[in-house]
Amino acid sequence: MGEQLTLDGEPSVKAHNLSVYQVGDHDYYAANSATEAEQLHLDVNELDEVDREPAQLVSDDVLDKPWQEEDHPGVAAGTLREWLSEATQPCWLSGTQ
């Protein structure tokens, strides 16, 4: 099956309604649903289904909290909201150890 095109001949783009979900204690994902974020977590970390952790939608306060560079404390790296705005598909955004 070939690529789908719009009426003006441009490739069609699947619209995403991405939100930020926290999975476990440390990882944040741009995803269309909690289930999708959980699956991304399994895939990115090469985990088995028995290791699935629940995803929680992130609050506005957390979305706007500035992150700093791990190797350069005090140097701003951005916010989850900024990284979400740059995401064009479901993906891992950030995490801590």
Image: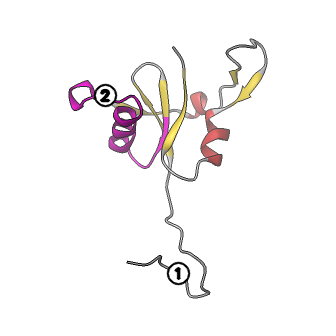
Of the residues under marks 2 and 1, which one precedes in the sequence? 1
Q: Residue furthest right?
A: 75
What numbered label is drawn on residue 5? 1
Q: Residue furthest bottom?
A: 7
Amino acid type, callout 1: Leu
Q: Disc 2 residue type?
A: Leu
Q: Residues within 10 Å of mark 2 (few under 14, many from 20)?
A: few
Q: Nearer the viewer, residue 45 or 73?
A: 45
Q: Residue at x 67, y 40 (%)?
A: 82
Q: In the rendered image of this protein, does residue 79 appear above or below residue 4?
A: above
- Residue drawn at 47 percent across, 76 percent down: 3
Quadrant in which the N terminus is drawn:
bottom left
Q: Which mark is residue 47?
A: 2
Residue 87, compared with residue 96, is above or below; it is below
Which percent across, then down, holds residue 2? 43, 78
Residue at the spot 49% in from the left edge and 65% down from the top edge:
14
Where does residue 87 sit, x and y in percent of width and height?
59, 47
Instruction: Determine the residue positioned at 20% across, 26% down.
Output: 50
Q: In this image, 96 relative to 44: left or right?
A: right
Question: What residue range appears in magenta?
Answer: 29-52
- In three-dimensional space, the C-alpha distance between marks 2 and 1, rounded to whole angstroms, equals 37 Å
Tag shown at residue 15: none
Side (left or right) of 64 relative to 22: right
The verdict on residue 51 being magenta is yes
| Membership of 38 in magenta stretch | yes
Task: Indicate the quadrant where residue 37 lies.
Answer: top left
Picture coordinates of residue 88 (x, y %)? 57, 53
Q: Quadrant of residue 10?
A: bottom right
The secondary element bearing badge 2 is classed as loop
- Circle 1 packing at 10 Å, graded few (<14), some (14-19), many (20+), is few
Q: Front-most of 17 and 39?
A: 39
Q: How is the image coloured?
A: secondary structure
